[in-house]
Amino acid sequence: MDFGDTQEEAQFRAEARAWIAAEAPTYLTDSLTKSGFGGVKTGDFDPMVEAKLWQRKKADAGWACIQWPVEFGGRGASPMQSVIWNQEEGVYGKLSGSFIIGQGMCAPTLMAYASEANKARYLPKLASAEEVWCQLFSEPQSGSDLAGLRTRAERDGNDWVINGQKIWTSGAHHSDFGIVITRTDPEVPKHRGLTMFFLDMKSKGVVIKPIKQANGESGFNEVYFDDVRIPDSQRLGEVGGGWQVSLTTLMNERLAIGGGIATGFPEIKELVDGLALASGRAIENPAVRSKLADWYAKSAGLKNTSARAMTALSKGEMPGPENSIGKLVAGGMMQDIAKFALDLQGLGGVIVDPELAAHSARLQAMLLRSPAVRIEGGTDQILRNIIAERVLGLPEELRADKGIPFSKIPSGN
């Protein structure tokens, strides 16, 4: 693949660069540059307020969700133009992190399964971040085994009544709407009795409880549903067809997350360039250089794998299971780099105050955030199964519950 710009791409890049130079919130540049992992830092300014302001400004000028159709709030841009935009947006792209679930996962599901009226109503406001969305999938007893979920939806005339609990819902406390997968028929095998909906997160009966994380942030939430009533018009796909709908969400999730995970390579390279060890400069140490070479090779592989996915999208193909590779490699690499970086710093590695620690404690924050990266959006083990079965064509993993009605599967309680 030729990574150089064509004449048309160079013109697009120049246009994007000029607009960003004129409109970017430069008062946030320093804070965003120092932002590491586990949350965007905006100094004395509210991160969500600033994120929405930047997203709305982009939307008004036609730079939000640029690959989306124009009628949905996008620009109808090509995948390569999207790559160019992300390159030019640079650190200001960190502000869009709060919207990646809605725009990268919920929106493709709405585009594929929502009615035309609902697309017209919700997608433009999703693109502009006037309305923020979340994804209500994981549950306390079925995190990795999504099809084992127990949140139920029961038909009541033209409505559905939802009861149950979701957990690890990113951004639920900031969200206006969410897509939720439920069990509507417990008397069939677990993959066949599911149905997907979307709902207003301010609905009566929805309770959101933030979860305190090891890094001090509370980006994840528990969400409870107590007789939450929603109309059938907010169903996505067929009754009992929720598993197929969820695959659209999950494939886009792995594309969005896998292509956007920060591996930590630039941070470790910057650290060793300026770090002095007892034996001399860290960058001159053979063991350090060997590690860097390995991580550089992985970074290059991730870049090219992402480019291959973008090429497939440009041909109109749906994201496939191969996108699990990016998240699997990047998540493990991020944790390995963080551990190595803190070991190199010795006692300095335990300092977590950004005002005192080297490199604003970004590598310390990376270590605290990295375990979640290897769990969210599919654990390492789940991703390996997907790659083995759906990419390499290996035999399926044996499942004791295959073909058994969900109601007959022991709950473990």
Image: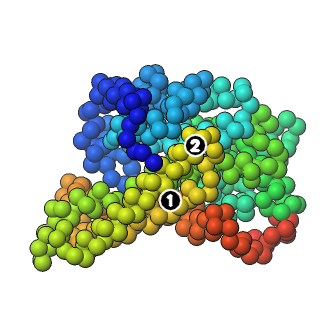
Q: Residue at x 61, y 65 (%)?
A: 387
Q: Residues within 10 Å of mark 2 (few under 14, many from 20)?
A: some
Snapshot quadrant of residue 198: top right
**Whole-percent x, y for residue 314 in the image:** 56, 40
Label 2 or label 1, whichever lies nearer to me, is: 2
Cα–Cα gap, marks 2 and 1: 18 Å
> Which residue is more in the foreground, 11 or 373?
11
Labelled disc at residue 363: none
> Which residue is more in the foreground, 209 or 333?
333
> Which residue is more in the foreground, 103 or 225?
103
* Residue 319 in sight here: yes
- Is 284 on the left-hand or right-hand side of 249? left
Q: Residue at x 46, y 42 (%)?
A: 98
Q: Residue at x 12, y 77 (%)?
A: 278
**Whole-percent x, y for residue 402 in the image:** 80, 70
Q: Residue at x 65, y 25 (%)?
A: 120
Query: Is residue 276 positioned above or below 91 on the image?
Result: below
- What residue did someone put label 2 on? 313
Snapshot quadrant of residue 107: top right
Labelled disc at residue 327: 1
Query: Is residue 223 positioned above or below 81 on the image?
Result: below
Snapshot quadrant of residue 406: bottom right
Q: Secondary structure at mark 2?
A: helix
Q: Secondary structure at mark 1?
A: helix
Q: Amino acid at mark 1?
A: Lys
Query: Is residue 382 positioned above or below 245 on the image?
Result: below
- Is 104 on the left-hand or right-hand side of 246? left
